Amino acid sequence: MVHTSTENNSKKLPQYVAALAAAGGAFACGTLLGWTSPAQTEIVDNHSGYDFLVSDTQFSWVGSAMTLGAACVCIPIGFLINLIGRKWTMLFLVLPFIVGWAMLIWAANVGMMYASRFILGIAGGAFCVTAPMYTGEIAQKDIRGTLGSFFQLMITIGILFVYAIGAGLDIFWVSVICGILPLVFGVIFFFMPESPTYLVAKDRSEGAIKSIQWLRGKEYDYEPELAELRETDREIRENKVNVWSALNRPVTRKALAISLGLMFFQQVCGINAVIFYSSRIFKEANTGIGPRWATILIGIMQVVATFVSTVVVDKLGRRILLLASGIAMAVATTAIGVYFYLQGQDEAQVESLGWLPVAALCIFIIMFSMGYGPVPWLMMGELFATDIKGFAGSLAGTSNWLLAFVVTKTFDDLNAGLGIGGTFWLFAGLTVLGVFFVFFAVPETKGKSLNEIQQELAGNRSIPAPTPVNGTEKQ
């Protein structure tokens, strides 16, 4: 968002530190997503871990209860973000994390497991709204994409972390370790600054100056950036409207349609079904790879591919990653569908094709992690005006988690009705629709300030010509 010659005097390292600290909540959220895989093996298959039995159907509710909790909290958290700030909202969320894990560790019955996962979903879902917003507001535009991608990267690291410790520890100690992680996050994030955008909106100019200097360095001339933040805030105040009027602005409707569309296609490509049921997919394919090693392999691929995305997102742009991701995922899910369809017709004819679903699944995970995984969350923090960002971002987050619940809960039913091959073909068809959506509806936000993105969404493409920055043109 900085347009002056002082931009090159700013330090980038503090911004990376703050973004990684904020993404610690995403790491904790990743442990929630990954917990179901080792837990299912121990609790359902081996009937251990708790003093009571848990059926397959009950465990499917344990797995999906967190998505319902996440969906319920996204809209309320949008108001809390604007009331107490981004930083204190994230610190407050440590409490439901600890309560949820404690209830899960010492659950006396299945009902307590449902409740604990719902509470943990509340904490995780709230982070999914707050962390991308915080990161988008503290980052300079030339590294905003990279810092925004840290969120999805830390989710994948959290998933891999649980897969890894789940291979050697029983589920009690896995849950205990996961319960300690939010405390570690709280201690680290306590020392991070509040978002300058929020501080300016609350007329706390001194705090905003300290925040900018913490993020950019003492040598950085904060005046131009502070002036831009104040000007944006002044325009919002002059045109202040209620939430519903703000949502009815054409630019907001367009941004919301794009964000909701990206969240929709992120979920209906089938990623949560793949994560939650990855062990079963490897088992059905008769690969000979043990379920735990299969999930660890998937976790490693997710982390590596998401890391690559963080490196290239500000160089290649958002659109190209989404388009490449969508095309590759559609091909991969089509191949998986073909394999399982042929297997259903005659198992003998696919005995030599065991590599096909595994290779396709690997391609799917890698390409999802490079495009559809991080980019929708990144763009959620970029598309909305400041005055509506909390509420509109919450709507997008709510839709994401509700879709995650639907996909997770209906995966087995779809398998029963369409066959596993038909289910993956359905995912492939929806992913192809997503490619067309990205091509025709999603703008490129790479290298643009948040104000410039708003201008483009409003149809004003006459963005000011590049101005010299230390003798070079600003791109």
Image: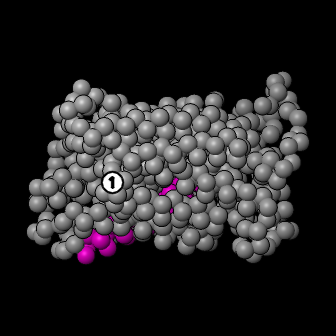
Q: Is residue 249 visible?
A: yes
* Residue assigned mark 1: 415
Establish if 374 lies above or below 91.
above
Please state the extent of the stretch shown in magenta in the rendering.
111-134
How far across and down, in percent of the image, does residue 402 sit?
48, 64
- Asked if the magenta segment contains residue 460, the reply would be no
Q: Residue at x 48, y 52 (%)?
A: 268
Give whichever of 300, 86 is nearer the camera: 300
Give whichever of 336, 393 is nearer the camera: 336
**Magenta region, mostly helix, strand or loop?**
helix
Asked where in the image residue 315 lies, by quadrant, the reply is top right
Scheme of colours in the image: one colour
Q: Where's the N terminus, which quadrant? A: top right
Type of amino acid under label 1:
Asn
Q: Residue at x 48, y 71 (%)?
A: 72
Q: Is residue 293 visible?
A: no
